[in-house]
Amino acid sequence: SGKSSTRLRRALARFSRRSFRRSPHEPPVTGLGRRSRHALLVATFQSAKGTSSSFQETCTMPKNLLNDEELKQLVLGSEYLSGTGERKEFDHHVVLKESDDLLRTLFFSIVKETTGTEFYDSLTRVYELSEKFHDSQSDADFATLAEKLGSLDKEETMMLASAFSNILNLHNVSEHVASAMEERHARLDDIPRGPAKTTNGAIKGLIARGTSPSAIYEALCEQEVDLVLTAHPTQALRRSMLKNFGRIRGYLLDLQRSRLSGYERAELLGGMTSAIQAAWRTDEIRRNPPKPQDEMRAGLSYFNDTIFEGYPRFCKRIDTALQNQGLPRIPLDHSIMRFSSWMGGDRDGNPNVTAECTRDVVYLARVTAVNLYFTEIQKLIFSLSMWRCSKTFGDRARGILEEAGAHRADSDVYEMRKRRNYSDFWRSIPIEEPYRVILAEVRDKLYNTREMLQEVISGNRHALDTDDDSVIVSKEQLLEPLMACYDSLKEVGDLAVADGFLLDLIRQVHNFGMGLVKLDIRQESDRHADAVDAITQHIGLGSYNEWDESKKTAFLVGELEGKRPLIANDLVCSPEVQEVLDTFRMVAHLQKSCPGSLGTYVISMATCASDVLAVVLLQRECGGDPKDLLRVAPLFERLDDLRDGPAQLKRLFSVPWYHRHIEGKQEVMIGYSDSGKDAGRLAAAWALYEGQEMATHVGNEFGVKLTLFHGRGGTVGRGGGPSHLAIMSQPPATINGRLRVTVQGEVIEQNFGEHENCFHTLDLYTAATLEHTLKPPDGPVDEWRDVMATMEKTSCARYREVVFQTPEFNPYFIQATPGQELGSLNIGSRPSKRKSNAGVGALRAIPWIFAWTQSRFHLPVWLGMFEAFQEMKALGKMDTLRAMYAKWPFFKVTMDLIEMVLAKADPAVAAYYEKELVDPSLFEFGARLRASLAHTTAIVLEITAHSDLLTPQIESGGQGTYSTLADKLAMRSLYITPLNIVQVENLKLLREIELGNAKPDWVPQKEWAKEMLARYQTNDLYHAVVSDTLIITMKGIAAGMQNTG
């Protein structure tokens, strides 16, 4: 079955390539030869269109702007990239292939120009050999490819790795563009939407199934979806590279959507070439690990680029969908989608996140918000030029002018606004323009706020002055004058004007506030316990850590009910405890000086009720206002904690003081990453499912509305997967209109890097939450629960036996993957291990998944599944498993995601890593693992009744399904395999260097290499080249697999 999957992928790849090859009867094309497979389309395209003068003018390329004949034909002969305007028809396969061919052709020409023909010939030869291997899948062709790569000099190898890494990132741009165009054509009803949902589609579907429109409206008005952007795993690409790839993406979209003149098209291609060359000439290696503040700045860039602008646009689409059903629009004060962040707040195992770091990122977000609002206010001043207003509003404007005139002459106002370099309206605004009068005052206050924030960030001021009337601290202060403008326009009959830019800005302020994103704080439960322990020992009560749970709870509740201060001024404690206390003091400070900037306090590795009570107490004792404490969410992430979590919630809710304190609302976070690493994906998935059911039941029992916070990663091994399917596969009655979910690393770029994808992401989460709330999926029958319980035990036992109890596993993992070398990648501010030992248990879930993804083995996702499924088959339960797949969304989504990962796996590549890197004594163990992968593939296909792993994607049709997975895997694999081979070779070299067995006196031979390596601050260029080549392959493979972990 695994071979069948591979054959199908390769057949599709051959078909896609041969579809664009030049006929032997066609005249040869100059330039890069057969890599431009669209040449054949040129003659066909021109023949079909005829030779009318208008068409010839449209397709003319000015020779002084674009002289490459092949490139000209590649563009003009394409179906979607010719610049002749957006087509009604859409074919994902063709869009992806044309974009990929164009970007690769441009890149190859740039390589030739910048490095010369010798390296260019090596690059194209490796590409041809990789293409040949992926067509044939023969061992001989693989050996030829490896031999060619092995013959290159060290500097050539590094440059080639960089080239293929760049090509993979360009291919990802092609995929993003194809997805964005597919979403656009689906919204235009050019193609069937398939399984990807919209809110409009969900509303129509719910009404068709009997839900009343009023129930839908009420649900949307109460719905709370919070997307939490996190920095782990942080994006493997540098921001400099991402910016260039973002420009390329924009140019590609313009080529597809716009009707361009020849000059415009050539200029656009010139811009694309500039961005590609800028990326190629940029050092893709992050030489130093990012600080949490850097990660926050990277996260905030998505608000500047897409989210801030996209949110009100999305709200208007929801308004239209509701109004089409005779319903009012969403209330102005309701935020249908919120955004939070962990960047600079997640201190679990990250010593770089300190109290001062948290302060920095909060103020960074505030400055970004003020800058965005300032820009919007300047636009709004131009827009609201009307003189009609309500009497109340006119009196307010007149009062502002009179007060200003009493304190400042018109000339002084002019000079002040001139110094501030406002875009316009420097002079005093007359009373005949009352809206501009009000908004000009808001503009002045925002400017003052920005100046004060800059002083705080630079260290010249301690905090914002919340008593200063000349600045804006809370969102209510900004909303008040905007709502006054809105009410006045509405009163005088200018509602259409009010519902324009002003409405958008009001919704932005309601949603983003003055903090832009709410920062969560996360810390490990043991750190809080140590802080309380230091306090109890200091006041003579003994060691808190040695008490049992009942004594801890009694002490904490007693203190919460009392008023005595606990923390003495002369408390002596460890640096770790001091940092915990400093964090709580900073939280109290930010709650007062930056209202609305903080969100939830998350307790990782939570195991009991006292973990939550301790955080509530420490907040109060460190200066927090008892009426304004952060909500506290326990994070249950290991298998045993997920099972025991509901019981701990019951104990927590049974505490009268706490039950009163939460006022009927509680947030609970469930962790997908550590549970999968602890027990395997199948066992973790079922534990998460049951844990949600039982936690919701406990909440209902105590009258508490539970919000489940899903800590999903980007990969299937860490709970990742298509968002709509993930939500719709959750247990019935567990979402109830309330959902928080993490969006991590490269997934942030995929979801919010482009406007269409940003809109689609907001639409998808809103639709899925609404649909799950009003028409939840079917739950399992008792027999299916019994089956899952048995499979959970079997798969978990097998997974733990292999990973934690088999002596061969740890050395095999260390040798067969780049897991030990990941620290040099500098992809995040957080260390890859919780502790400094080398065991798997100390490794974080992200590098654990990353390492197996690099070798394309994906072991954490499937290990243990075969034994569980085989046991059911032996018990005669195969028909039951098939019924579960056909009728139970949870099991179907689980199996489909497993299929996707199995399709990505390449046992041949994994075997190559083993052959070249692993001690021969471990070969038998590796063979058993690969046999288990093959057995898993076979039995998964038997359960799903699919002939091949890619069958469902090919046969189902609709948006996002037309053989897109096959296309993407085939195209990416062509570029990834050379990087795998280069990575293996350089892993060997680096390990020899570190053992002291290989340190030759090596110097580069080629001039371009000497120039490039002259930047290195080291005399050991050999070590530097090997290390850099390895890092580049890691980044390239991560780009090709589209996840860092």
Image (cartoon, rainbow, N blue to C red):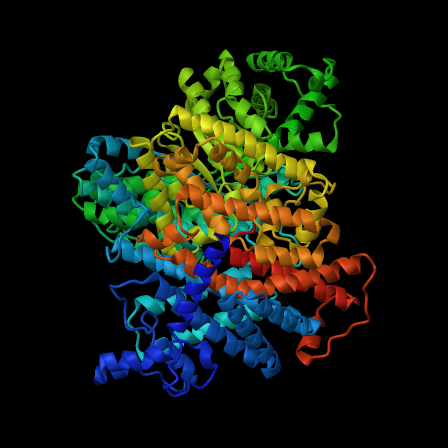
Residue 961 versus residue 351: which sits nearer the camera?
A: 961
Residue 521 horizontal/vertical position (percent): 56, 35
Q: Is residue 338 above or below residue 693?
A: below
Number of marks in the image?
Answer: 0
Residue 467 horizontal/vertical position (percent): 48, 35
Residue 785 horizontal/vertical position (percent): 43, 26
Q: Is residue 140 above or below residue 431?
A: below
In the picture, measured across the screen, residue 662 lies left or right of residue 548, that is left
The image quadrant of residue 224 is top left
Give the residue displayed 30% in from the left and 53% down from the top: 958
**Residue 926 visible somewhere in the drawing:** yes
The image quadrant of residue 29 is bottom left
In the picture, measured across the screen, residue 366 lies left or right of residue 992, that is left
Give the residue displayed 69% in from the left and 18% down from the top: 544
Give the residue displayed 28% in from the left and 54% down from the top: 186
In the picture, measured across the screen, residue 33 lies left or right of residue 192, that is right
**Residue 426 visible somewhere in the drawing:** no
Residue 302 versus residue 114: which sits nearer the camera?
A: 114
Q: Is residue 409 above or below residue 113?
A: above
Residue 56 horizontal/vertical position (percent): 26, 83
Residue 299 versus residue 1037: which sits nearer the camera?
A: 1037
